[in-house]
Image: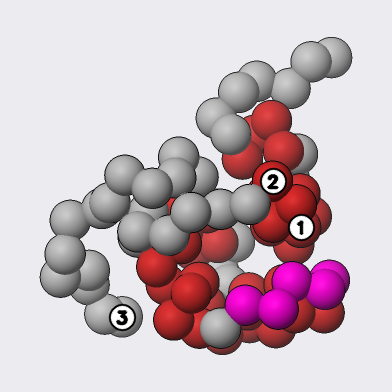
Amino acid sequence: MKHRKEPLGNKNIIGNRVSKIRKAQGMKQKEFLARLQTLGLDISSTSLSRLEGQDRLVQDYEVVIIAKALEISVNTLLGEKDEK
């Protein structure tokens, strides 16, 4: 596994969380990319890497698709507790 050479950026608040959740699920970035594309998010591997490194802005519709691809709620992705 490659380790990040640059420190995390400050362009989004979900990138680091996306990376951690994806890895905890045992999902490689390539597999995650395929899931995102299947759900209609046209994103390149470079853009996904920049998103996870918090060096890319994330659109609101992308947050919804990313959460769906990770099978988590948007609240969880944003670091909030889900309401019961």
- In the image, which residues are magenta? 39-43
Position of the N terminus, as image quadrant, is: bottom left
Residue that numbered label 2 is attached to? 60
**Circle 2: is it few (<14), some (14-19), or many (20+) Cα within 10 Å?**
few
User: Which of the marked residues, 3 or 1, is nearer the chain's N terminus?
Assistant: 3
The label shown at residue 74 is: none
| Badge 3 amino acid | Met
* Residue occupied by mark 3: 1
Q: CA distance from mark 2 to mark 3?
A: 29 Å
Q: Residue at x 50, y 72 (%)?
A: 48
What residue type is disc 1 on? Answer: Ile
Earlier sequence position, callout 2 versus callout 3: 3
Q: Is residue 14 above or below residue 38?
A: above
Indicate the secondary structure of the residue bearing disc 2. helix
Q: Mark 2 is on which residue type?
A: Asp
Residue occupying the point 82% across, 79% down? 38
- Residue at 55% from the left image edge and 30% from the top image edge: 79
Instruction: Kindly identify which residue carries mark 1.
Output: 65
Q: Secondary structure at mark 1?
A: helix
